[in-house]
Amino acid sequence: MPDPKSKNLTWHEGQVGRTEREQQLGQRGCSIWLTGLSGSGKSTLAVAAEKALHDRGRLTYILDGDNIRQGLNSNLGFSPQDRTENIRRIGEVGKLFTDSGVIVFSSFISPYRADRDQVRAIMADGDFIEAYVAASLETCEGRDVKGLYAKARAGEIPEFTGISAPYEEPEQPELVIDTDGQSVDESVAVLIEYLEKNGYLSA
């Protein structure tokens, strides 16, 4: 992580810490990092999982790639450098949400392992849950309601992940969610089971 440009900075601690916030919420904050090709089902899974957890009284939030690029990251494109900065910024936002005790879903293609590893590196052990939303390129193109793959194959969208730009699959993710072979409800169940087994959801 680069040092801040300003050197006249002091970290200020509050009187309420993460432990107190998590005890109040009855959950452990974490960043569930949903990565995969466009059309793999990241956003669909995030929305369904958030609703399932909300119905159980859990505090959650979704950070979605398209949404973030309309505000916080509206000045970034899709060059390798801009992709890296896009993920760096959202990693910092996710870290703040996690510290607040929220279960946050970050739904980003995030094609480069190094960028995902950088986000993991700024978080405490167990705070970053890499969830590979796995679907074949053929399946993703078949779900292409936005017509992005067709435009990419026609050369209208440069540097499109999976067509003219690479996607580096996670090598050791905490979760692999196979959206080729299971329904949305089954995928949500896999994710929530992981949270339950690993102590993110208190009784």
Image (cartoon, rainbow, N blue to C red):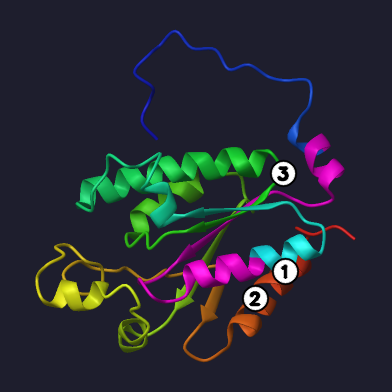
Residue in the foreground of this view, choosing between 149 and 17 = 149
Badge 3: how crowded within 10 Å, few (<14), some, or many (20+)? many
Q: Secondary structure at mark 1?
A: helix
Magenta segment: 20-49
Residue 160 at what x, y percent from top left?
21, 66
Measuring 82% from the left and 58% from the top, which residue is drawn there? 57
Q: CA distance from mark 2 to mark 3?
A: 21 Å
User: Which residue is identified by label 3?
Assistant: 101
The question of residue 35 being in magenta is answered with yes
User: Which residue is identified by label 1?
Assistant: 52
Q: Are marks 1 and 2 in contact (CB under 8 Å)?
A: yes
Residue 134 at what x, y percent from top left?
44, 79
Q: CA distance from mark 1 to mark 2?
A: 8 Å
User: Which residue is identified by label 2?
Assistant: 188
Badge 1: how crowded within 10 Å, few (<14), some, or many (20+)? some
- Determine which quarter of the picture holds residue 185: bottom right
